[in-house]
Amino acid sequence: MKLEDLQPGDLIFDHSHDLFGLLIRKITKSWANHVALYIGEGKVIEANPGGIKINSVNKYLFPILRKVSIFRIKASEKQLNHMIENAKLMQDSKYDYFQII
C-alpha cells in the first residue's frame, strides 16, 4: 500500500497478528480487529483506548506484525467530506469500553 493510493474517506482495516489483535478477532468473531478512517494529508482518525485521535497513517503503511485491507466507500465527495468532518468532531472523545464488552 502506498500513501498516494489512499483517498480521503478510505477505510483501513487492520488484521494484526499479535496476541491482542488475535484476541479481539476471536472475541468479536470478526475478520478485522481495528479500523481507521483516512482523512487526507497523511492522517487517519481512529478510536483507541486513549480516546479518538488523529494519527499518522505511517503505522499502516509499514506493517511488521499486521496486515491491512483498504476499502473505498462509494459516495460523493460531499458525502465523504461530511463523514470526515463528523469524525473530526469526535476527536478527544473517550473510548467506550462498554461497547467492547
Image (spheres, helix red, strand yellow):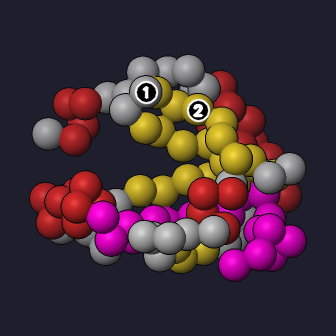
Q: Secondary structure at mark 2?
A: strand
Q: Nearer the viewer, residue 23 or 10?
A: 23
Marks 1,2: beta carbons within 8 A: yes
Q: Is residue 70 left or right of residue 4?
A: left
Label tally: 2
Residue 13 within the segment the image draws in magenta: yes
Among the 4 quarters of the image, the one containing residue 88: top right
Q: Which residue is mark 2?
A: 53
Residue 68 screen position, x and y as percent? 52, 73
Q: Is residue 77 left or right of residue 100?
A: right
Residue 83 screen position, x and y as percent? 68, 45
Residue 42 screen position, x and y as percent? 80, 52
Residue 25 in view (yes/no): no
Q: Whole-Å distance between the Cαs marked 1 and 2?
A: 8 Å
Amino acid type at circle 1 is Gly
- Mark 2 is surrounded, within 10 Å at the Cα level, by few (under 14), some (14 to 19) or many (20 or more) other residues, namely some
Amino acid type at circle 2 is Lys
In the rendered structure, find residue 50 and report the number of the disc placed on it.
Answer: 1
Q: Would you place residue 5 above or below residue 46 in this image?
A: below
Q: Is residue 39 left or right of residue 64?
A: right
Q: Nearer the viewer, residue 1 or 38?
A: 1
Residue at coordinates 70% horizontally, 47% vertically from top-left?
56
Instruction: Locate the N terminus by quadrant.
Output: bottom right
Q: Is residue 15 left or right of residue 57?
A: left
Residue 87 within the segment the image draws in magenta: no
Residues in magenta? 1-18
Q: Nearer the viewer, residue 52 or 65?
A: 65
